[in-house]
Image: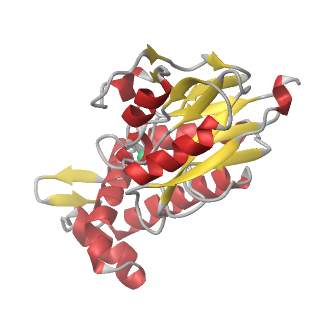
Amino acid sequence: MGLHSHPVHCLPVRTPTLPPATHTNCYVLGPPEALVVVDPASPWKEEQEALWAQLQGMGRIAAILLTHHHLDHVGGVQDLVARAGAPVLAHPFTAERVDFAVDRLVQEGDTLADWTLLHTPGHATGHLCLWRPVSGELIAGDMVAGQGTIVLEPPEGDLADYLVSLERLAALEPEVVYPAHGPKLHVEVFGRYIAHRHARSAQIHAALSAKSQSALELVAQVYGDTIPKFVYPLAARQVRCHLHWLKERGQAQDTQAGWTA
Ligand SMILES: [Zn+2]
């Protein structure tokens, strides 16, 4: 059996993630004698037990790889380490942010079976994707979502980095994109996300004036009634990411009283 014939297994686990998503996809890759488990995500006992029951029938776990440090991706790592005794692999920036041991630091260009790691900062500084050139498959982590949206939280979230990473993933022209939340996606998702972010930046730029406004005031202007009020603080953090991006391009000023054109 050639490497190419090892399918990607998707084992969704329930996690405390951002609604409307309720699950994180744990992916299992590689040959049965050396499986790689990506993001054993659930902090909840019954989900960890269900995941373990499925994994036991699949083969020997050789590595646990983290796409990034967010709790809805790493919640089940310690439980799986205790059960499987496999080493945890993560980017150095991810290793700095988790409260358990990372056994091997990995980065751009490292390989696991026929998968190559890509460092794709933007959503998280240590974010990794997995790319399998032989089949055109991409494990995309939280770069894009099949359900819900991707949040950029400053200062960790960086729109300029995120856009560069999305462009890079689009240029690979993957045959199939496996996100961490929701069903698999097609390559067009990257262009759609890039266009959405540029449209949002343009909207925020247009809402700026000589009068200083807070990010929250800009949310009311830009989003209005399209989102419920309780999401405004989250949206304000997104808006702040766009404002920093605009500022770097000389299209917004950060004054003591707020943001101006
Ligand atoms: Zn995340």
The quadrant where residue 189 appears: bottom right
| Point 56% across, 55% down: residue | 145
Q: Quadrant of the C terminus?
A: bottom left
Image location (x, y in percent) of residue 156: 33, 40
Instruction: Work out whether 73 lies above or below 201.
Output: above
Would residue 168 be seen by someone viewing this image from the given angle? Answer: no
Q: Position of residue 144 (x, y in %)?
A: 57, 51
Residue at image location 59% in from the left, 59% down from the top: 182
- From what the image shows, is residue 21 above or below residue 15? below
Image-quadrant location for residue 92: top left
Q: Which quadrant, please, contains the N terminus?
A: top right
Residue 56: image location, x then y, percent: 61, 36
Q: Out of 63 and 150, give the one closest to the viewer.
A: 63
Position of 24 relative to 95 (above/below): below
Q: Nearer the viewer, residue 251 or 48?
A: 48
Which residue sits at x=41%, y=16%? 103
Q: Position of residue 166 (x, y in %)?
A: 59, 43
Residue 42 is left or right of residue 217, and the answer is: right
The total number of labels drawn is 0
Residue in the image at 36% along x and 81% along y: 224
Q: Is residue 13 visible?
A: yes
Does 91 sit left or right of 60 as displayed? left
Q: Residue furthest bottom?
A: 225
**Left or right of residue 94, residue 191 in this image:** right
